[in-house]
Image (spheres, grey):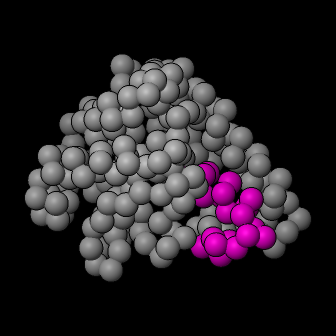
C-alpha cells in the first residue's frame, strides 16, 4: 500500500515563496496528493495490484475502462510525486546541454513548454518526455501520463487549478513562467536525462 511519507517534500512549505505559497504547497501536497494515495489504496486493496509499483500499475491499467479508477489515482500519485521532486526555488543549476541542443536554447524550450501548459483545455499536465530517441513536449488531460504511452517522463507541470489558483487565479501562463524560471531544479532534470540515455 502507498503512503504520503514515501514521497516526502525536499523543501520546507514556505521555501518556494513567492512563486508558490506555503498555502498552495499545503493544499496541493497534504490534501490533493494525499487524497489520490488514499483513493488508490482503496481501489487496490485485496486485488492483484496490491504490492505493485506505480509504474507497473499505470502501464497495465491504462486505457482499460474497468481499471480507470486505479489508473487515474495511480497516475496522479506518480505525476504529483514527480512534480514535487523537481521543485526548488532558484536552484542556480544550468539548463541541461541535451535540452539546449534539442530545443535550440532555454528560451525556445520555455516558450514551447509554456504553450503546452496553457493549451491544456481543462485540467491536466504539460510534459517533457523522451520517446523514440527524441525529446518532446506534450500535454495530457486529467491523469494522463507518459508511462501509459511507453514514453519516459523527464519534467512535468501540474495545470490542474489546485496547483496554482490560490496564487495565480486564472493566470496559468504566469504560473508556467514562474515554474520554468524559478522553480525547476535543472539538476534533477539532468539526472533524469542521464538515467534514460
Q: Residue at x 58, y 26 (%)?
A: 26
Q: Position of residue 51 (x, y in %)?
A: 75, 66
From this viewpoint, which residue is outermost toward the front? 121
Q: In this figure, what is the number of numbered marks?
A: 0
Looking at the image, can residue 183 be seen?
A: no
Q: Is residue 131 magenta?
A: no
Q: Is residue 20 above or below residue 85?
A: above
Could one spot residue 169 in this view of the protein? Answer: yes
Describe residue 118's horizontal placement relative to residue 104 as left or right.
Answer: right
For the residue pair 5 and 106, the one nearer the viewer reads as 106
User: Measured along the vertical axis of the image, is residue 122 above or below residue 91?
Assistant: below
In this view, the residue farthest toward the bottom is: 132
Instruction: Please report the bounds of the magenta region as a residue range.
Output: 59-79
Residue 112: % across, % down: 24, 52
Residue 79 in picture, x, y percent from top left: 53, 52
Depth check: give the residue in front, 178 or 140.
140
Q: Residue at x 81, y 58 (%)?
A: 43
Viewport quadrant of the N terminus: bottom right
Instruction: Judge left or right: residue 73 versus residue 81.
Output: right
Q: Residue at x 58, y 46 (%)?
A: 7
Corner quadrant of residue 129: bottom left
* Main secondary structure of the magenta stretch: helix
Query: Looking at the image, is 6 positioned above or below residue 18?
Result: below
Task: Choose top left, top right, bottom left or bottom right for residue 49.
Answer: bottom right
User: Magenta stretch: residue 63 in it?
Assistant: yes
The residue lying toward the viewer, choosing from 17 and 114, is 114
Percent of width and height locating residue 185? 31, 43
Residue occupying image coordinates x 72% and y 64%: 68
* Left or right: residue 20 compared with residue 134: right
On the rendered image, what quadrant is the C terminus found in?
Answer: bottom left
Amino acid at each position: 500500500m502507498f503512503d504520503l511519507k514515501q514521497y516526502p517534500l525536499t523543501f520546507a512549505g514556505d521555501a518556494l515563496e513567492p512563486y508558490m505559497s506555503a498555502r498552495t504547497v499545503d493544499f496541493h501536497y497534504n490534501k490533493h496528493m494525499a487524497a489520490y494515495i488514499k483513493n488508490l489504496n482503496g481501489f487496490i486493496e485485496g486485488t492483484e495490484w496490491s504490492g505493485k509499483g506505480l509504474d507497473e500499475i499505470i502501464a497495465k491499467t491504462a486505457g482499460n475502462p474497468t481499471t480507470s479508477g486505479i489508473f487515474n489515482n495511480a497516475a496522479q500519485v506518480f505525476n504529483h510525486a514527480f512534480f514535487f521532486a523537481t521543485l526548488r526555488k532558484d536552484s542556480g543549476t544550468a539548463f541541461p546541454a541535451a535540452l539546449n541542443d534539442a530545443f535550440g536554447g532555454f528560451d525556445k524550450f520555455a516558450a514551447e513548454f509554456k504553450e503546452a501548459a496553457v493549451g491544456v483545455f481543462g485540467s491536466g499536465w504539460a510534459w517533457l518526455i523522451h520517446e523514440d530517441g527524441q525529446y518532446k513536449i506534450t500535454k495530457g488531460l486529467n491523469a494522463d501520463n507518459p508511462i501509459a504511452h511507453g514514453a519516459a517522463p523527464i519534467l512535468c507541470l501540474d495545470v490542474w487549478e489546485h496547483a496554482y489558483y490560490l496564487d495565480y487565479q486564472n493566470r496559468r501562463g504566469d504560473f508556467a513562467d514562474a515554474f520554468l524560471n524559478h522553480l525547476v531544479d535543472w539538476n534533477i532534470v539532468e539526472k533524469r536525462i542521464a538515467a534514460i540515455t
